[in-house]
Amino acid sequence: MNRTSLHTRFSLAAPLALMAALLVTAPAWAQYMYLDTNGDGVHTGADVVNPVGSTQVDVWLDTNHDRDGSLQTCNSHTGAPVDYVGPPANPGLDIFSYDIYLVVTHGTVSWGGFEDTIGFKVLPNDEFNTRTDTQIHISRASELGGEKPAGRYKLGSLTVSCSAGTPSIFFSPMVGWDFSSFGTHCSASEEFPNTYVYGVDWFDADGALYGGTINHEPVLAQPDRMVAVENHEADQALTATDEDGQALTFSKLSGPSYVTVTTTDPGTGTGSGSIHVAPSSADLGGASVGIRASDGIFWSDRTLIVFVQPELDLNAQPDVTVTAGQVAYQPLSASNPLHENVQYYIASGPSFVSLDSPVYGIRTRISPTPADLGTWTVTLGVVSGTARSEKTFTINVLRNGANHPPTVAVAGPAQGYVGRTVILDASHTTDPDGDALTFAWDLGDGVRATGPRVDHRYQTPGDYSVELTVFDPDVSVTATMNAHIDPVAPARAFVSGGVSAILGGASTVSVRVQSVGGSFAGEEISAANAASFVLSSAAGQAAAVGCDPSGDPDADRDGAPDQGILFTASDVASLLGSYAGRREVALTIQGDLVGGGRFSAPLTMQVIRHGGPLSAGISPNPLNPVGQLSFVTNSPGTADVKIFDVSGRLAHHPIDHGILPAGFHEVSVGHGSAGEALPSGIYYYRIETREGVARGRFAVVR
């Protein structure tokens, strides 16, 4: 019986020549997009289409590695939604959509349904409308904000049945608007920004020759949770198996420096390694450690949790309220994982506190007299060799049968901002005896106040210890809290319309500012303070020329109010400096608030290059409900802008051979020619001017 091969390569001479030419000059981008039929997660000559019955075909994508196995990095997040924050170090390429275009040769097939496995949703014009017995186009996209970080994913599975011949299936380069690709906020080629196209930006390179030996992933056994003691070492063995009998190496991917991973025996199918933990006193607490076993091509990762506990830790002592003339006892105990001999002691405290040692353990004896009324602080300790631990608690001594202390309740923010009112409210403080109370505040900056409520403005940033003492006729109770004061109120900034770009054709740029976490009210950004608003970058700073007169209270339609501040376009251009070859410029906008204090917000402007081939960009991508398509022309002339759906149908013709001046141009996208909202799906734009043609791809997700 003939085996029907499943290939992932070009099948025609012309595309092969194109691929060969591109391989010479193109960088090695994302490594893996491959087909797998036997469920082992890789593609080799063992993957075939069954000539009888059906075959489940899995589609895999790894955006995190180059063809040589090294980590892929993201050069910029062009076209990302407002406030999009990319992954941390070595971010790789995120993914917000994918297109799979499969072509069949040497036979025909019957396609079953495709099941997505990463949570992306079906888009219109999917495979049910674009399938034949020799091709299929599958299109999926995430909800807005549902991007997947860089990594290795099984995108989904579909069922294939052989209808005639000995069919082979492979990914295809672009044919019309159909091609294999994935959407990422990392910039790709100038041809399709934010879209990594198979055969243009990257190639399928799963590394296995057809008919060769299947290389299986090793299997690393899950290590046990480790509990270590400060200043003491601990070890745990690692084991991993490899079905192919290959030598294995063990390494640490992430985690604290006090954890090391070594290979003790590479083996020939079963390898071993070791986890060594040597924490210091500075390493107390839990940590996560990433561990890898690799056969040199594929790998298996596991996560280990390490918890470092103190060598000696006196258990917390609760505060005590006792009546004068009575005796109270509290047990003493300590965490002592090494089970060494310990000795308890009183580091400080009143003379009526002592240690008592009955036969069943040690305890604190508290025996105040009527002369000891008030609140006392006691520090207890435990020692074993060089290890020592101390804890502090308070004792409140009440008069026998008479007065009881008030119960202090303070409401107030743990955080505030310089020059803005911080409210400290103790009006809910109560006294069990109904006594009249007086309040004395020490606000930590040299200011003292009285009364149950204080409105205060700190003039310098820092951490302030606020102390409140509440008095009844005989007893006082003191409570403390920390007030953290930041220099400025945090804010979010974006360029009106959702596009951060140099507005070469406009006279002004409107920078919208929005409060973060309710740090100030929207109306506190006012024309009355316009003289204080400043936009700055490494190249200098620019003063505002006023507030946006549009009166739009929510320019980005996110449900939170924002205010516009105007700057001249020439001033903004000067802040971008010499931006040849640059994509993004970091700026800061700040100014005074009507209610006191100042705000500050970071702003990243994406610079569309002037000169050279026509450049364009779209933001956000994916969009919901609308986005902005922007481009720059260096000279006046005709321009034609078209939006197509995934089937190639013209969905919108926003500029029909119009005459445009030189400079920056912006077109709203997300609606059709009649103004109707475009349905969810993949769309393409084409911009043609006298300077060239720019085209790209975007997703609408509603």
Image (cartoon, helix red, strand yellow):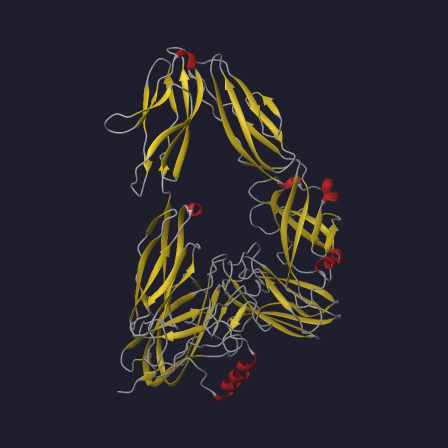
Q: Is residue 43 left or right of residue 613?
A: left
Q: Is residue 411 left or right of residue 445?
A: left
Give me the residue at 37% from left, 29% from top. Answer: 345
Residue at left offset 37%, top offset 18%: 322
- Locate residue 690: give its quadrant: bottom right
Choose between 240 and 216: the one closer to the eye: 240
Residue 584 location, quadrant: bottom right
Residue at x-position 39% and y-position 26% = 319
- Indicate the position of residue 141 as horizontal and vertical percent values: 47, 64
Residue 538 vs 333, above or below: the answer is below
Q: Quadrant of the N terminus?
A: bottom left
In this rendered view, identify the residue nearer to me: 574 or 524: 574
Instruction: Confirm whether residue 549 shows in the render.
Output: no
Tell me which residue sits at (43%, 56%) in the image: 255
Q: Nearer the viewer, residue 173 or 354?
A: 354
Residue 237 drawn at (x, y percent)? 30, 60
In which image quadrant can residue 503 be found?
bottom right
Q: Is residue 465 above or below residue 58?
A: above
The residue closer to the viewer here, 278 or 682, is: 278
In the image, is 406 to the left or to the right of 636?
left
Residue lying at the far front in this picture: please name it.
385
Whether residue 571 is visible, yes or no, is yes
187 versus 356 height, above or below? below
In the displayed structure, 379 sits above or below 437; it is below
